Amino acid sequence: MLAGAGLTLAVPGTLGTASAAGSPTAAAAGCTAGWGSLPKVSTETDYKPLRDIRTGRHACYDRMVLDVLGPDAHGPIGYRVGYVEAMHQDGSGDVVPVGGGAILDVRVAAPAYDPRTGQATYDGRARQPLPDVDLSGYRTFQDTRFGGSFEGVSQVALGVRGRLPFRVFQWGNHLVVDVAHSWRGFR
């Protein structure tokens, strides 16, 4: 289950049933997966606008979900997610300060505006924490920053405790980024 912002979404491949506070079912399942820390990439995309970014806590990992707009719930969402030494904002190249022991650079082929009208579809401000995301009580997530949208790609910095295993997958109009709480069981 994916919880947050009033939405609950069953996601196949998750470890047991999770909620905003985690789950005994997932903990009993043993937190095992074939995740790693190398970049994850999908180059196919429909370039639908970014609508929202939210997070959730689970027994074995913390989750970030990027929601995109569009009538086709199964169109591909392009992305590149990987660890970086420093977050460089697209376009300017300026370094964006991000808290945490490691930084995941999340780039999604979903501009924060409607390309037809130019109207904003996401309220994020460049170099600022993500709006409406409170990381209090998270084990792995420590900071978020919106890098902005440049040439149809939105950039998000996710500060985490350390270089931990993660996975990325699409579920309908959602791009999901899960970061494990530890390496134990995720090799």
Image: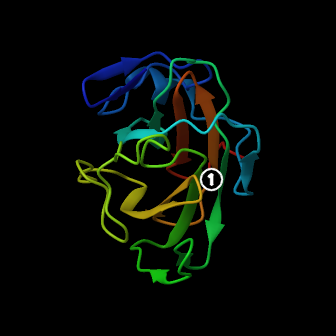
What color scheme is it? rainbow
Residue beneath disc 1: 183
User: What SS does tag 1 mark?
Assistant: loop
Quadrant placement of the N terminus: top left
Q: Residue furthest bottom?
A: 94
Depicted 8 relative to depicted 137: above or below: above
Residue at 54 percent across and 42 percent down: it is 178
The image quarter in which residue 168 lies = top right
Number of dots carrying numbers: 1
Q: Position of residue 124 (x, y in %)?
A: 32, 56
- Is 48 or 101 nearer to us in this picture? 48
Residue at 63 percent across and 34 percent down: it is 169
Q: Position of residue 161 (x, y in %)?
A: 46, 65
- Is 181 or 105 nearer to us in this picture? 105
Q: Residues within 10 Å of mark 1 (few under 14, many from 20)?
A: some
The image quarter in which residue 25 lies = top left
Residue at 33 percent across and 51 percent down: it is 138
The image quarter in which residue 104 lies = bottom right
Q: Position of residue 176 (x, y in %)?
A: 53, 37
Residue at 60 percent across and 65 percent down: it is 163
Q: Position of residue 13 (x, y in %)?
A: 62, 22
Side of 45 where 174 appears, left or right: left
Q: Residue furthest front?
A: 117
The amino acid beneath tag 1 is: Trp
